[in-house]
């Protein structure tokens, strides 16, 4: 029990998020890819790369300033993915619309969160501590992904359950990042 209390919240969040993601991914991917031509997939990937490169360049130039909005970005991502999931589950958005919406949201909002998370980790961990974090994060995420994919290979979740699990994975990750962001404080941003 003591190990759980001392576990790094970012590692715990990533592991739990990956568990939900790996449970959901087979059904979400299968459903959203139906009816999409390879040219639409290429277009979505191209748009994603283009937008993500612009966002990343902004973070390279303005990391300290953008970091102040990191907590807001975490909340916005949960809200917009909740809306996208609800639109899909209520048949307002088609699978193709969900796929394209996810590609755009991933490039714009998730890329900001990834860049902000990189800053958070740079402020939180030093030297070998960062290496240990990265390796633990990868290790436990792989373990929970193995568990999730094993379960989803035997249990085929309904489409609504799959999409809800995907959303829960996104929300869990952001909750843990927000917790650490608030715990570390924005003041650390000033000293580096």
Image (spheres, rainbow, N blue to C red):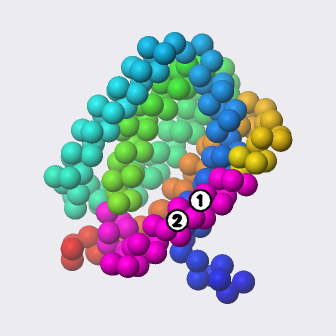
Q: Nearer the viewer, residue 190 or 5?
A: 5
Q: Which segment did they paint magenta?
A: 119-147
Q: Is residue 150 visible?
A: yes
Please state, as top left, top right, bottom left or bottom right, where the N terminus lies in the image.
bottom right
Q: Which residue is mark 1?
A: 141
What element does badge 2 sit on?
helix
Q: Which residue is mark 2?
A: 137
Q: Where residue 110 sits: x, y (%)?
A: 42, 45
> Which SS type dominates the magenta stretch?
helix
75 in relation to 129, above or below? above
176 in relation to 126, above or below? above
Q: Which mark is residue 17?
A: none
Q: Tell me where residue 88 sits by quadrant.
A: top right
Residue lying at the far left of the rendered structure: 61
For the point 27% across and 46% down, the residue is 56
Residue 121 vs residue 166: left or right?
left
Q: Where residue 33 sits: x, y (%)?
A: 59, 22
Residue 22 vs residue 14: left or right?
right
For the point 51% across and 43% down, the residue is 79
Q: Where residue 16 sits: x, y (%)?
A: 64, 59
Residue 191 vs residue 92: left or right?
left
Residue 110 vs residue 115: left or right?
right
């Amino acid at each position: 029990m003591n190990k759980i209390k001392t576990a790094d919240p970012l590692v715990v969040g990533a592991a739990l998020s990956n568990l939900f993601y790996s449970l959901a991914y087979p059904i979400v991917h299968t459903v959203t890819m139906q009816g999409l031509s390879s040219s639409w997939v290429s277009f979505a990937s191209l748009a994603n790369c283009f937008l993500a490169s612009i966002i990343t360049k902004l973070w390279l130039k303005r990391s300290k300033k953008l970091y102040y909005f990191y907590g807001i970005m975490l909340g916005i991502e949960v809200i917009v993915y909740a809306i996208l999931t609800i639109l899909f589950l209520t048949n307002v958005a088609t699978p193709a619309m969900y796929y394209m919406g996810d590609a755009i949201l991933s490039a714009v909002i998730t890329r900001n969160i990834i860049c902000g998370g990189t800053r958070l980790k740079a402020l939180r961990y030093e030297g070998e501590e960062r290496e240990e974090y990265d390796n633990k994060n990868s290790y436990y995420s792989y373990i929970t992904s193995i568990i999730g994919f094993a379960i989803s290979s035997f249990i085929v979740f309904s489409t609504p359950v799959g999409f809800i699990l995907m959303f829960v994975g996104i929300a869990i990750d952001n909750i843990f990042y927000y917790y650490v962001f608030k715990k570390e404080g924005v003041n650390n941003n000033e000293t580096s």
